[in-house]
Image (cartoon, rainbow, N blue to C red):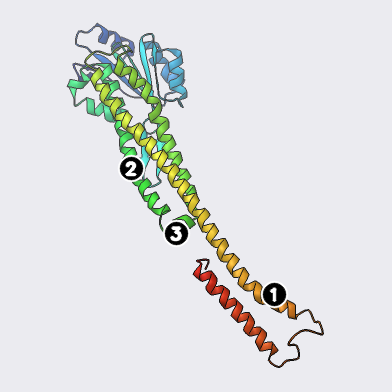
Amino acid sequence: MIVDSAIYRKGRRAETPGDLSDALAQCRASSDDAFIWVGMSEPTAEEFDQVTSEFGLHPLAVEDSLKAHQRPKMEVYTGSLFTVVRPLTYDDARARIEASELMVFIGESFVVTVRHGSSRIPAQVRGRLEHDPKVLGRGPVAVLYALLDAVVDAYLDIASELQVDLEELEEKVFAPTGGAETGVAGVIYSFKRQVLEFRRATGPLSEPLARLVAGTVPYLSHETKPFFRVVADHLARANEAGDGLDRLLSDILAAHLTQVGVRQNDDMRKISAWAAMAAVPTLIAGIYGMNFVHMPELRQIWGYPAVLALMVTAVTYLYFLFKRRGWL
């Protein structure tokens, strides 16, 4: 469905278009750099047909916009530049990243944005640009810049939040009892999946931004390239943060598994020590339980307490021996 549409003249919202075809023709015929911006949210094929026909959007790009589940990319078609980005939000309470998709068409005197998911970035950017006519007055490419800038800035914020949560997880793993908690490995794997979702959004976006910085795509002017250079720099920082988080998570997981192995070895030593102490009296009792006639001390009045004393002495000796070696 169309959630918002407007004609902008000299960077200011002028009117809401009635017929899209007439509005686009008026914008192209005007001398004040007017353009029309149509915002859509999860449109059906029937709802998108009118926009497709009026703006001459390429069928392949339209198919991608309807199906969603696209990786970030940029494609040049006759009459339009098609860009896909993945806005992210971070639910701190659940430590979970939620991804949306945003498709942006820009062409001569028009912008079409298609949103899939719960991201509020298109509406926020429209509201901010409508209060900044100097930027909005640069035309459709300014809308693309503002959208990319908002998406990438959100990446940096999410990277900071992930870093904070990762530090808390690191403290938990390296706490005295951290390695013994059975759920820690699952938490680490879950966190690693969130970092992977983050990198899926940030990594592929590097190539489209490099093309924008180089100015190898249409609808860009020499004055707009420095703006995209700033966005590309922020994206590089986000990618570096994602790589660092992934490496640190791998190190934490390896350290946790090492802790588990060490604790298991400690447990096995303790079990072995207790088993050895239990084996000595069991051995002595087993020998005297064989019921042979000729056995030492069977007829002696002190034989029974002597054997008990031998058992206690042997077990006590083993106990202090294992204690001194750190097995108990």
Q: Amino acid at mark 1?
A: Leu
Q: Amino acid at mark 2?
A: Glu
Kindly identify which residue carries mark 2: 161
Can you tell which of label 2 and label 1 is closer to the viewer? 1
Mark 1: secondary structure: helix
Q: Does the CB distance between marks 2 and 1 fall below 8 Å?
A: no
Mark 2: secondary structure: helix
How far apart are the alpha carbons under marks 1 and 3? 37 Å
Image-based side of 83 in relation to 9, left or right? right
Kindly identify which residue carries mark 1: 283
Task: Tell me which residue sits at (50%, 66%) in the image.
Answer: 326
Mark 3 or mark 2, earlier in chain: 2
Q: In the rendered image, which quarter contains the N terminus?
A: top left
Kindly identify which residue carries mark 3: 177
Image-based side of 309 in relation to 232, left or right? right
Mark 2 or mark 1, earlier in chain: 2
Residue 31, quarter of picture:
top left
